[in-house]
Image (cartoon, helix red, strand yellow):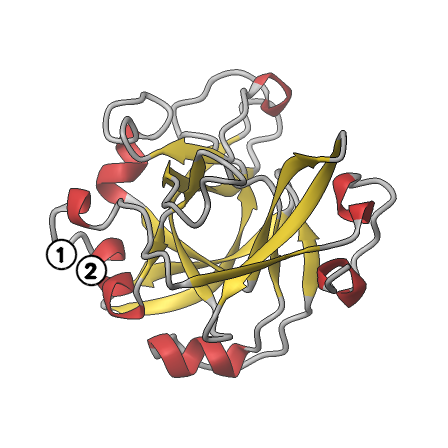
């Protein structure tokens, strides 16, 4: 699955690729994004695309209990996302893309879990297919905007590390996904093997409490 990723691109990179709505703004580099944290999300705004923020971990609008009782929803499986109650409404009406500079996965090496960092060979942002929703807290009446990343079967490049991977959209498919312009099954598929590169990184990333949030987390070891 996808449980930790980075967002270290600039606003100019995202705007150049997708022509998102101005004004431009400074985006802080973040190297350790975990579930429940706010993340950059690309959503529809009229006929345009906008870069905004959502809590990572989707809370459907119909949820009646507290946020504390919410099960894990930071990933949605491509094979069942259209039918699962947690995701099916957002799948039909509230699609988004979560841009990423890379993501982490772990595998057992020498008896220890070794993290590896995956990024685009091109150096450009990755466009992860996602969903978003808005929920009103029944106690405070505050509105929470949240999102999830859709995952699919791993391609052969990812299989030595995990049996799942994020759905990575081509730049030309971002609008098609968000605006529901094509059959979703043609997009929610494993990425080509040639898209990604990977290298082992520090085990600091394995702990959200002690890893920090600095560029050293993605340096090869």
In the depicted view, which residue is nearer to us: 10 or 146?
10
Instruction: Where is residue 26? Give x, y as percent.
Output: 63, 78
Q: Position of residue 9 (x, y in %)?
A: 57, 73
Say which residue label 2 marks: 176
- Near-viewer residue (129 or 132): 129
> Which of the numbered marks, if any, corresponds to residue 137?
none
Is 127 located above or below residue 5 in the figure?
Answer: below
Q: In this view, does 97 lie to the left or right of 102?
A: left
Position of residue 136 measured from the top left corner of the image (x, y, whole percent): 49, 32
Front residue of 26 and 195? 195
Q: Name the residue under label 1.
A: 181
Dot 2 or dot 1: first in sequence order is: 2
Q: Eyeballing the image, is 105 above or below 86?
A: below
In the current view of this chain or complex, which residue is farthest to the right? 210
x, y percentage for residue 175?
25, 64
Residue at left 13%, top 56%? 181
In the rendered image, the vertical position of residue 200 relative to residue 207, given as above or below: below
Badge 1, how many Cα within 10 Å: few under 14, some, many 20+? few
> What residue appears at the point 59 percent right and 19 percent down from the top-left corner?
66
Q: Which residue is drawn at 17% across and 42% down?
A: 185
- Quadrant containing the C terminus is bottom right
**Corner quadrant of residue 173:** bottom left
Residue at the farthest front position: 110
């Amino acid at each position: 699955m996808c449980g930790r990723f980075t967002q270290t691109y600039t606003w100019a990179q995202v705007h150049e690729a997708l022509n998102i709505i101005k004004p431009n703004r400074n985006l802080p580099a973040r190297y350790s994004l975990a579930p429940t944290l706010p993340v950059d999300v690309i959503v529809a705004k009229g006929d345009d695309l906008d870069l905004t923020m959502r809590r990572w971990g989707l809370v459907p609008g119909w949820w009646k209990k507290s946020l504390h009782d919410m099960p894990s929803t930071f990933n949605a499986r491509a094979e069942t996302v259209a039918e699962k109650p947690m995701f099916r409404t957002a799948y039909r009406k509230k699609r988004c893309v979560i841009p990423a500079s890379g993501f982490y996965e772990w595998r057992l090496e020498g008896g220890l879990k070794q993290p590896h960092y995956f990024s685009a060979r091109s150096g450009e942002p990755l466009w992860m297919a996602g969903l978003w929703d808005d929920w009103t807290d029944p106690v405070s009446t505050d509105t929470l905007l949240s999102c999830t990343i859709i995952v699919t079967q791993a391609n052969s490049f990812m299989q030595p590390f995990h049996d799942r991977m994020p759905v990575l959209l081509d730049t030309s498919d971002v609008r098609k996904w968000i605006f529901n312009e094509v059959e979703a099954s043609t997009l929610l598929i494993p990425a080509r093997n040639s898209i990604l590169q990977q290298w082992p990184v520090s085990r600091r990333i394995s702990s959200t409490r002690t890893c920090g949030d600095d560029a050293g987390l993605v340096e090869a070891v």
